[in-house]
Amino acid sequence: MRRNKAGLAAVLLAVGMLTACGESTETNEDLKQMKVDRYVTLGDYSNLSISVPAAAVDQAQWDELLLAVYQGSVTADNGGITDRAVETGDTVLIDYEGKQDGVAFEGGTAENANLTIGSGSFIDGFEDGLVGVMPGETVDLELAFPETYNPNPALAGQKVVFTVTVHCILPGADGMEDAVVASMGIENVGTVEELRQYVYDYLMEEAETNYTYSVQDALINAIMDDSEFEELPRTFLDSYRELCLAGIGNVAASYNVTVETFVNYYYHMSSEDYLDQYSELQAKQEVLMQAIANREGLAVSDEELQEKLGEYAADGGFESVEAMVGERSQEEYRNFFMTEKVLDYLADTAEITE
């Protein structure tokens, strides 16, 4: 996420030239020494009052995840239904291979895939072609892709043959068995009811984490709305812009798309506008947090920083702090830990209504 040495040298050279013209050269790494009171006038955060939804588990989500976890361990020999033919509405466990003129095409092959018959997940004729098939049977489905097929335009309108083996029909919620749950190997989970509780606990933990984030967002927004900011140094904003670009770049790469494509699709704006807006917001929030940390004595000392880095590295399974930090700066972590301390302080002193 940080600049490489060559890039940093170039930036330092540019900074030196700017300094001669009286420009500030502060970056996010300088946050703990920055005279943040020059840039923000804090609002009153001593009597914050916020309202957020309570942490709760949605019943439909609970049921859906429970069934998905259970069905993920079902096979033809372990809980699968094999004594009747496939019907519309069944979820089946299948292998399939698609070929065009006898040659397998990219994206047309899978093993142990779940498919709900009638869901419309596959091209026309695929799901209907499995109705009446007995588990254990293999069938050839002669089909054609639609005239417009965006995932792979080369296949649009083309005739293909899918060879499909139906392993078994997956049971619904009322067909779950303790023996299948016991085979999952989850510690202290051996029955359907224990699995149900296990899934609930997972979802509740997730809901509580989201609740914490909601509280933090509400606290930050409340203080931001009541505080006034001066224009931040350009180099300071640029350092956050660089971090934002690296982060969004990693996400875009995971989808195998460019940053511009990803931002256009998800945020409906150009990547330049997104980076400008997000980096300025992030910079203002951290200046705000640092100002409160200074006032309340919540700054992160060098000793605290090393202790927290050690804990995070150990929890993450890294061999050392250096291996975890990599090319990043430890000061980025200091800023993160400082923000954590401030938000904990604000949550303890605020009135929170659920």
Image (cartoon, rainbow, N blue to C red):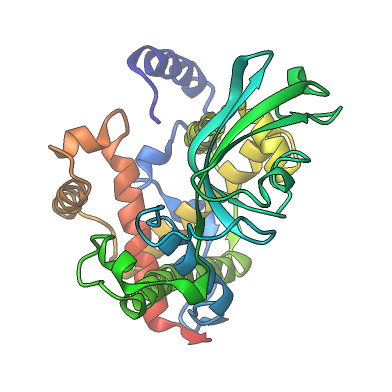
**x and y percent of residue 282 in the render?**
53, 49
Outermost residue to the right:
147
Q: Residue at x 59, y 21 (%)?
A: 106
**x and y percent of residue 259 in the render?**
61, 29
**x and y percent of residue 54 in the render?**
51, 82
Q: Quadrant of residue 143?
A: top right
Q: Residue at x 22, y 50 (%)?
A: 312
Q: Is 15 situated above or below 85?
A: above
Nearer-the-camera pick, 20 or 104: 104
Give the left or right position of residue 2, taking residue 301 as reference.
Answer: right
Nearer-the-camera pick, 195 or 274: 195
Nearer-the-camera pick, 222 or 163: 163
Q: Is 273 situated above or below 2?
A: below
Nearer-the-camera pick, 261 or 191: 191
Give the left or right position of residue 192, taking residue 137 as reference.
Answer: left
Give the left or right position of residue 270, taking residue 31 as reference.
Answer: right
Quadrant in which the N terminus appears: top left
**x and y percent of residue 293 in the render?**
35, 63
